[in-house]
Image (cartoon, helix red, strand yellow):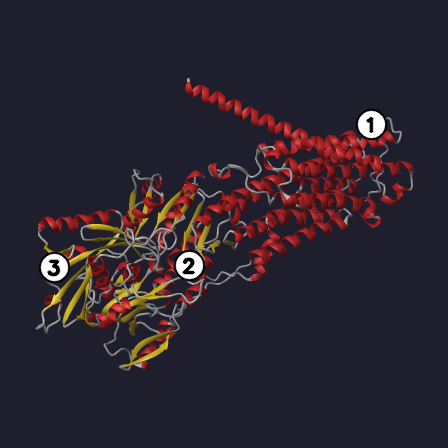
Amino acid sequence: MNGAHDKLPENLPWHELPVPELFAALRTSAAGLSSQEAAARLARYGPNTIRAAAAKPLYLKLLANFTHLMALLLWAGGVMAYLGGMPQLAFAIWAVIFINAAFSFWQEHRAEQAVEALKRLLPAQATVLRDGEERQIPAAELVPGDLVRVSQGDRISADARLVEEWDLRVDQSTLSGEAHPARKTADPLTGQPLSRTELPNLVFAGTSAVAGTGSAVVCATGMSTEFGRIAHLATATSDTPSPLQIEIDRMTRVVTALALAVGTLFFVLSVAVLGRELHTCFIFAVGMVVAFVPEGLLPTVSLSLAMAVQRMAKRNALVKKLSSVEALGCCTVICTDKTGTLTQNEMTVRELWVDAAVQEVSGVGYAPRGEIGRGGAPSAGLKRLLTAAALCSDARLVEPKGKSEPWCIIGDPTEGALIVVARKGGIDPEAQGALLPRLRELPFDSVRKRMTSVHREGEGETAFVKGAPAEVAALCSSLARDGAKLPLEPPLLREVLGQVDAYARQGYRVLAVAERSLPGDLTDYTAHSVERELTLLGLVAMNDPPRPEVASAVQKCHSAGIRVVMVTGDYGLTAESVARRIGVLGRDDTCRLVSGAELDAMDQAALDRVLAGEVIFARVSPEHKLRVVSALQQRGEIVAVTGDGVNDAPALKKADIGVAMGLSGADVAKEAADMILLDDNFASIVSTIEEGRAVYSNIRKFVTYIFTSNMVEAWPFILQITLNVPLALTVMQVLAIDLGADLLPALALGTEPPEPGIMERPPRPRSERLVNRALLLRALVWLGSLMALFCFTGFFLLYGSYGYSDLSHLPRLDLVPYQERLASPDGRVYVLAGTMFFAGVIGAQAGNAYCCRSERFSVFRIGLFGNRFLLAGIAFQLLFCLALVYLPPLQRLFEVTALPLRFWGVIACYPLFLFLAEEGRKWWLRSREARRAVEGGSGGAT
């Protein structure tokens, strides 16, 4: 519905009204609406569709890649170069912006389709009563007051109040996250402390009927439905920048301020101290700015993240947004749903209690593979229990058609689990159904809490009953045990109920199964006449089993300092049981269970206190999940949210990184998420966290690598202004290093595998800077200054080899055009010296690339040849240098010349000396840490 249409008052107590009052309130009847009235209401209330939010135009998404802070800095640098008379430099800088923008836009372009996915979940047709006749209409034409029919397998089209139902059960997991189908009733409900989605006489758009039939009156359509509300939450939740985006923006501001400050300072000094022309000083200032701006950083970060995305795809994680890669690596909390995420969303019988003994059942899911007890032939009591349970069920097991398809069930998952366990015990439900044909059925209802089926057995009739243990046991007069029927006296009843309590404490769902041979003269098949004097056959304990790999994945999260918080729509005790089985909670850990209703009653301070300890949030709505995620973020946590249902979509979008399930996940969850697990495997999150941490570490490595060369590039301009040394490196040569020679080695550093122990460290704190004091000292003061020392040594060594003894008064030919320099002897020597410096920077960077492979580990430990991409990058770097030095067209463009062979031997020493010096620093650092560890241990022992 759009804004021009009316809306029914929201939150009206439809669930409390008796059917006649409900019809009166909605101005309808048991015959449904007339076609004329339905058309009028369609015009008044609008179509039953989800309103699409205004999407951000594609041109704005593309424009954003040209207007972020780093891009603006490069635009300004290009303008300055153009105004300074260096158009080729300007166009080169602007090309960097265009290439990076196009790449980022192509990689990240995903239309926001959460609302469209919601539309696809709504059915195309609905069965209604119009003019007293049943007919099929497009679901979009449903209006408030329509009387709809719901049958097994139908997807429900709108929110509606039931007026009739026959054993109706609805799968609401997409809304509530609860694994069990909800039993429905048509009775009015008053004074029930339940959330709207828990009310058993309401059905909701986007859910589906798994068993039974019913009729309901539509009370909400379109955006007024629960689906519509979730759509609004998902689209109203704004995207937040990732930690990496924040850090790069912060670094860009620092670099911008530094570059502009240095450029301005030296511009002023050139004018005031040296008295040069303004045009010359401006070109010099542009050179300083270009030297300090890491032009290659932006494409290197984008390409490194893209390569990480490809590696994650091989580990079954599809990343939709580049910046999300690193965000997962620094996450501190994972908020995870239970059903379908930690568990398999396949009810499985785990134990049977029969003949006073517990029989364990192996195998999980709907595949009928596994054994009961120790295998072997089942006892007569076990066979009777399995036969009764299977025949008193309406579900059907479906065999996969292909090797890649799973076993599945049609109908109630609980009943499906009974069919599967019967197959495991050697019972063929279809064959037994032919031997014992069903004659009648007393459907389950929420008052009796049981179901009964009556079957022909020989010359008589037998009733099989299954249901809630307490209710079924109360109707039993005997207990089947070892082929005999024992009177169910109080001691024996206490034994039965004690076993039920033991199962409940383990988080199992328990069913009791009983039978009765009916008298031959029975003619009134009512619950009162059939469900009496039963014989209890046994108990069936089942659960939605955890995924087998989840426990080890949770343990790895704990080792990595990552907290796992369960936020589920299921019941609290069930969630706590799963949490303890998979290790989210220790056996002796105390845990606070917080329901959605309790969360509503909490203020922010109370919620903060709850989040400080172990907590499970149960029976929560989408708004509750949003609030939990927001509260954790306000506490400074970096939050990842996993989920697979529609109800998870708002929280997935709000989280720092949303992780959706690819196989079982709803479309809207996938669209709202930043990352999709292609195998629905929670354990894959651990792999992506490890990859994310490696990405951040690798970004620091190539930032160090790039900043080191930036420092070397700045020194020639500093010495030119302070000591009147001829400019050893031109602006175009700076650009050739930043965007040509350094690019592939920097990118190769982004492919370094995770360092040893990376998953045994706590997540980096949010306050930790990407470019911190230690990185700057290492890159600028240590490595950068060493490289500058080596390169200037070669620069002056070349001058000395050509007879220039007074190195403090070298001829200043750096302001003379390139062709004029080559025309004079002094000019040719100057070009050779500049070439020596340029080639020296590139050669030293080859050694620097190896230095940057680890911040503290020796390269010999992680393997000299462990990164084949780096070897290829260094090979390209050297070939690039040789091409510029020896190819005439490139010589003129970059103002270099062919370098005599003897000087290459000097340049070859640069990377070796730099590498050995850095290895010495790392050895000293490790030795100091080892001494401190020993001293700390000795102090503790003392």
Q: Earlier along the polypeptide chain: callout 1 or callout 2?
A: 2
Residue drawn where x is 20% and y is 48% of the image? 501
| Gap between marks 1 and 3 measured at Cα | 108 Å
On screen, 477 above or below 38? Answer: above
The quadrant holding residue 123 is bottom left
Which element is circle 1 on? helix
Quadrant placement of the C terminus: top left
Between disc 1 and disc 3, whose residue precedes? 3
The image's mark for residue 665 is: 2
Residue 32: % across, % down = 27, 77
For the residue marked with disc 2, what is the amino acid? Gly
Three-letter code, disc 3: Leu
CA–CA distance in space, label 1 to label 2: 71 Å
Can you identify the residue that label 3 sits on? 475
Amino acid type at mark 1: Ser
Circle 3 SS class: loop
In this view, 166 is above or below 354: below
Residue denoted by label 1: 808
Rendering coords of residue 673 (x, y %): 46, 55
Q: Residue furthest front?
A: 376
Residue 587 in view, yes or no: yes
> What residue is rendered at 87% in x and 29% in y?
804
Q: Is residue 868 left or right of residue 434?
A: right
Q: Secondary structure at mark 2?
A: loop
Q: Are marks 3 and 2 in contact (CB under 8 Å)?
A: no
Q: Is residue 116 left or right of residue 779?
A: left
Callout 2: few (<14), some (14-19), or many (20+) C-alpha neighbours within 10 Å? many
Q: Would you call the spot at circle 1 few (<14 residues within 10 Å), some (14-19), or many (20 or more)? A: few
